[in-house]
Image (cartoon, grey):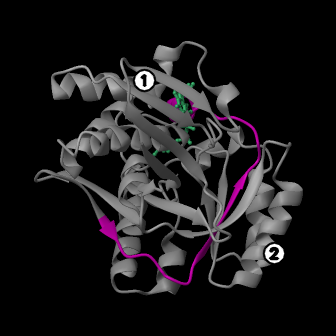
Amino acid sequence: MIKIYAPASIGNVSVGFDVLGAAVSPIDGALLGDCVSIQSADRFSLSNKGRFVSKLPAEPKDNIVYQCWELFCQRLGRELPVAMVLEKNMPIGSGLGSSACSVVAGLMALNEFCDRPFNQTELLGMMGELEGRISGSVHYDNVAPCYLGGMQLMLEENGIISQSVPGFDNWYWVMAYPGIKVSTAEARAILPAQYLRQDCIRHGRYLAGFIHACHTQQPELAVKLMQDVIAEPYRTRLLPGFAEARKASQDIGALACGISGSGPTLFAVSDRLETAQRLADWLAKHYVQNDEGFVHVCRLDTAGARKLD
Ligand SMILES: Nc1ncnc2c1ncn2[C@@H]1O[C@H](COP(=O)(O)OP(=O)(O)OP(=O)(O)O)[C@@H](O)[C@H]1O
Ligand SMILES: N[C@@H](CCO)C(=O)O
């Protein structure tokens, strides 16, 4: 049997709408992500378990892991008789790249099971296609970091989908999921169709500057540039308590704070464990709304999706 774990990810990282993403893992060793196991069988089956199993679509064929199997078989040119099990540990509509976790774990499990008939780029292309079915348009900023690890910049040119960007090794990423759902498709639909020229210029400066700051390892510059003029100003109204939590995070000493993906998860960055812990405590008390919510102090997950023993 092969079992694949695929980690949570932060789409956009504030500054790179649809083109920048980061994989994260809790520092306490908890597995914040989905797992898919696969073994040979007489015929195809998919079963589901895990904390958020009840939130999966009622129709089995609507489960994105079923669609992973279907697409993989289509591309392979034959039907694979395998038994797959999805461990749905990630809340759906959380901003933590929940569907990406399932897609990445599902496709990687299939590819490993078949001794890797598809290379990394081909597999990532399939991951983007499936993610696009869910949110309405192809964007790789969750699947790429989830699959490849670290911080990933989408290039989509010259046969390259994504390349990694160096992060800051001493940064903690505090992830606070309030326990409510925000649909990615809806959070995309409320964005303007057109932007002012001044916002386009600021967006270009922030993203280019942030990538430059990462490559030249200038953390103070990087945090100043982690600003979102594309989505956050419009999405804040979908996120109860976000503005207050952002302000409190800044007061506590966060270097940066933003919406993870399309929300409602909030991320806050600190280079000190003690501050990260204080941020986590405040967010657990004030941003989390119910028993399904949680807060984790994380680091960048540089390994990405991987086999578990
Ligand atoms: N295995 C799966 N995991 C997650 N969502 C799934 C899965 N299979 C099907 N879906 C459907 O995909 C949609 C996912 O919604 P959405 O993109 O808003 O969530 P998400 O992937 O958690 O978002 P985000 O990327 O912000 O974390 C839901 O309609 C859900 O029912
Ligand atoms: N870039 C996507 C990420 C969704 O998780 C968005 O913000 O809509």
Q: Which residue is at a point 81% across and 75% down the rendered structure image?
A: 278
Q: Which residue is at a point 47% across and 78% down the rendered structure image?
A: 222
| Corner quadrant of residue 181 | top right
Q: Which residue is at a point 43% across and 43% down the rendered structure image?
A: 105
Q: Is residue 124 left or right of residue 53?
A: left
Q: Which residue is at a point 20% across and 43% down the rendered structure image?
A: 122
Marks 1/2: CA distance? Answer: 41 Å
Pointer 1: what residue?
66
Q: Disc 1, ligand 1: is the CB inside 8 Å?
A: yes
Quarter occupied by the N terminus: top left
Q: Is residue 154 left or right of residue 97?
A: left
Is 32 or 202 nearer to us in this picture? 32
Is 126 or 180 nearer to us in this picture? 126
Magenta-colored span: 164-190
Residue 179 vertical placement versus 19 (above, below): above
Residue 246 vertical placement versus 86 (above, below): below
Give the amino acid at mark 2.
Arg
Camera-nearest label, 1 or 2: 1
Give the SS element for disc 1: helix
First in residue order: circle 1 vs circle 2: 1
Percent coordinates x, y for residue 83 in the rendering: 43, 27
Residue 237 vertical placement versus 222 (above, below): above
